[in-house]
Amino acid sequence: MNTTEKAYREILKVLNKYKTEIVFDVDDLENKAKHHLFGVKLVEKHGFELEPESIKSTDWQKLKENIHIGFWDGELRKISWSDDGSQPNKETLLCISYPTGAYMFGGDYPTEFFEKFFLELKTYKPKYIDSVDKSLYFSLDNAGKVYNAYDSIIKRYYEENKEDLKKRNIKKMKDELAKLEAQL
């Protein structure tokens, strides 16, 4: 038991002892302690680079754009189209999801460019993959690595996309010019 957990246990034990005599919402304080301890666990055990105080739920929370951490029971919350048909069984997972797919890199839906990006995220070994919904699910043992690397990965791909978008636009304009010339 770490010092933070010990401190919460001692404090909550005293608060619960006098629960009917005090004005504090002890249940709310217990929940806040639970969330903070979960954040501490993410940092200390799983290597997440985040502030433990930022965790406000152990059930479902957005950590970054397109990144959520949540509890999947495999029944009420399950993976829509798991590639191999498997489902989580009462697991907390980190989910990285792109519901709009390649549109995140432009209105021309650059599928090949998005797939290159998605394949790089897959190198972090997700436990479950939902290719249809463009979602990756990582066990907590593996999630800290991809979470910590995510900002630099997405930044690099957005930078690469600037050049790739120019090339795609040039190709599109050349194709349109060829069609017009063919109509002469």
Image: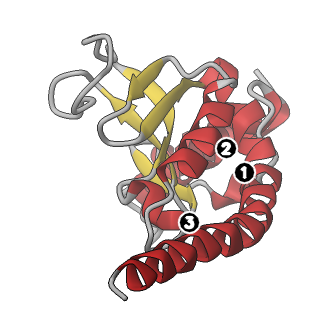
Residue bearing the label numbered 3? 105
Front residue (pair 52, 99): 99
Q: Is residue 61 above or below residue 39?
A: below
Residue bearing the label numbered 2? 39
Residue bearing the label numbered 1? 52
Answer with mark 3 or mark 2, whichever residue precedes in sequence: 2
**Residue at figure coordinates x 51%, y 65% from the top left:** 104
Quadrant showing the C terminus:
bottom left
Query: Do tag 1 and tag 2 residues touch (Cβ < 8 Å)?
Result: yes
**Could you tell me the amino acid type at mark 1?**
Pro
Front residue (pair 86, 23): 86
Q: State the residue lying farthest toward the left.
A: 76
Q: Position of residue 146 (x, y in %)?
A: 71, 36
Q: Position of residue 80 (x, y in %)?
A: 22, 33
Query: Do tag 1 and tag 3 residues touch (Cβ < 8 Å)?
Result: no
Q: Is residue 140 above or below residue 182?
A: above
Front residue (pair 122, 33): 122
Q: Is residue 102 above or below residue 81?
A: below
Quadrant showing the N terminus:
top right
**Residue 17 placement, left or right of 161:** left
